[in-house]
Each structure stands twice: as structure tokens, then as C-alpha cells.
Amino acid sequence: MLGSNKITSLLHTKWAGRNTVYKDITGSTNDDAKELAACGADHGTLVVADRQDTGRGSRGRSWETPPGANIAMSLVVRPNIPVERVPMLTLVMGLSVAEGADEAIRETIQQGAETAGQQGGEAPSCEATSAPAGAAGQRGCEDPDCEWASVPDEGTCGIKWPNDVVLSGRKICGILTELHMNPDGSIGDVVIGVGINVNMKHEDFAESIRDVAGSLLTGTGLRVDRSLVVARVMERFEENYEKFVSTCDLSLLKRQYEARLLNKGRQVILIDPKRTADIAPRNKVEEKFCKQEADNKPDTADAETEGGTPSEEIGTALGITDLGELKVRLLSGVELQVNSGEVSVRGVYGYV
């Protein structure tokens, strides 16, 4: 059951989500939060909706939330930080979603085991049929013969730089951060919109995104209480946010973030944002990578912008800087610090 009373009853925060506004249906929780902020809503005010019809994703994409399965929420914060540091809040939220989702999954597993023990029966079985083929090492089933039987001690939600939360190789979360300025040029408020796929089945995703989109259900076989997910994400965000604003950078969160960074140590392609939709198919990418590796230099013959500047480069992700930039070593040996507003990143062998 998703609702403000359920969420607040599960919360252990000082301010994050303490004022929760719940809506059965809305157009956009970001728009709702923006209106509340303009009317003086407190720092930490949270808008949560069961259904969202006209939500916005990154790069102008839509983000719709069907009823009964996922989470659409937007948080109002009023940070006292330099304006240029606001984009890092998106990374802070991505980390918090990954950590909070893992905590909710662990609690769901524990509650199921405890209930089964008290009733003298078996723990709830997983819904393995909801999970996409090839997802391995996930958790949620007590049957040792089930492919979903592995329950790792470490969390399984990772991060594709800068802020995509990924479970079993599929994106489960989208984040959109919007800054609203005061007339004097100071920060009025920041609204961080979050969409989390929780109990959506693989076959219910639109065919156009089915290969990359997933949910907690498809990644674990478990149905997870959405209110629990909201509460745990808010708890993690409050702690991570306070670390962030104390330094105005990610220095205190870098270790946590890199522990979940799926790109780290992997080959990545740096892509001009305007050409993201035109990524070559896998076989072409593999051919390019093999050729560049053999030549030990970037192949830019078919990847130039109108000005002659290479629009694609291949290298290895090394981690992030204190400002959230991705550190990449190109095949030429040159090391770059990449800003998420300048390029997109894709794995050489697929989405991650």
C-alpha cells in the first residue's frame, strides 16, 4: 500500500519526507513539488503519486508511471551551496536510491523468512517468471534449486554514471533535477524528481524500452512494498545530502558511489549527447573497439561532428572526481575528466 501515512510510519528521518503529500493521480510530481516550493513548502517536502501521466525524464523524454506498480516522487530541498554544484544532487539521489532499494529488498527477504518461520511453513516463493532471461545471482527465492536462490551479502543495485540505477543489467530508476532561482540570483529551491520501477513485470514495459528497463520485481523475483522503498530512499538521501552540503562536493560520498559504479574498470564509449540515439549496433562497436585497440588510437573516421571534432571516444572508466566527473583513460593513454552535461556514456558491450 502506497500512502503518506504508511510512508511516514516507516520513516526514520529528521526532515526528508516528513511532510509527505500523496496523490492517487497527477500529471507530474515535479510540477506539484515546484508549486508547493513556490508557496513556501519546507525543505524536505515530498510529493508521491501512485500514477503519473505526464512526467518528464532526461533529454526531454517522457516518464509515465502506471498505477499500482511503481513510484513517482519529487523532493523539495533548499541547499545553501554554489549554483554550479546543484547538478551533483542528481548523483547524490542516484546513490541514495541504489542504497535504499537494497535495504528495502533485504527487509522484504527478512520479513518473508520470519513470517514463514512463525507459521511453520515455507518462505514465499519468488516470481521468477517475471524476471528476464539471463538475470543471474539475484535474490528472493528460498528454493536451492531455483536460479534466483543466491542472496548476496552485498547490495545488487549498481549505478551507471552519472545517475542511472541498474539492477540485473536493467535501468530501474530515472532522476530529473530542476533548479528554481530567486530574483536576486540565489537558489530558491531544487526539486529532485525520482521514478522507480518497483513491481512492474517485464512484459508490461513498452517494447521500445523492454531491452533496457527493469524493476525490483524483474531483478529479484520479489514484490516489494513501495512505501518501504520510499522511506528507505529518503533515509539514505538525508544522510548522503548532509555529507554533500557539508563539503559542497562528493568527497565524503565518493567511496560509497564508486563501490556501486558499474562503469568502473570497464571500457566505455563517450558519445556526443546529440548523437546518443544513433549509437552503432553491437557488432559495429566491437569492430571499432578491436580496431582502436590494435592501433592504440581512436578511430574517428566515421565519428566526427560538422566541425571535425571527434564525437565518439573509447576508453576505460577509472572512477569519479570529487565533483562527480567520470575519469576515463582513452586508448591513447590520455586521461579525461568527463562532465555529464558534455557527453553520454555507454558500455562497449551494451547499456552498462
Image (cartoon, grey):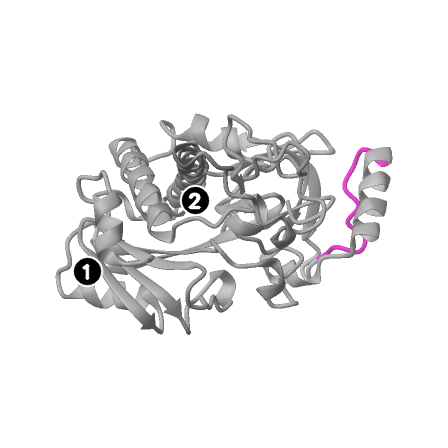
When asked about the image quadrant of residue 156, the answer is top right
* Residue 320 seen in the figure: no
Residue 221 covered by magenta stretch: no
Query: In percent of the image, x 35 and y 34: which residue is there?
Result: 249
Q: Is residue 52 above or below residue 299?
A: below
* Residue 305 seen in the figure: yes
Place of residue 217 in the rendered image (x, y in percent of width and height, measured from the top left): 53, 50
Q: Magenta residues, as a range?
A: 295-304
Image quadrant for the C terminus? top right
Query: In percent of the image, x 46 and y 33: which residue is there?
Result: 257
Q: Is residue 193 above or below residue 108?
A: below
Is 132 left or right of 231, judged from the image as shown? right
Q: Earlier in the sequence, mark 2 or mark 1?
A: 2
The residue labelled by disc 1 is: 182
Residue projecting furthest to the front: 120
**Which structural element holds mark 2?**
helix
**Near-viewer residue (211 or 189):** 211
Q: Amino acid at mark 2?
A: Gly
Query: In percent of the image, x 39 and y 68: which residue is there?
Result: 51
Residue projecting furthest to the left: 40
Q: CA distance from mark 2 to mark 1?
A: 26 Å
Q: Residues within 10 Å of mark 1 (few under 14, many from 20)?
A: few
The residue labelled by disc 2 is: 94
Query: In percent of the image, x 47 and y 63: which residue is there?
Result: 57
**Which structural element holds mark 1?**
loop
The numbered mark at residue 314 is: none
Q: Mark 2–mark 1 contact, CB under 8 Å?
A: no
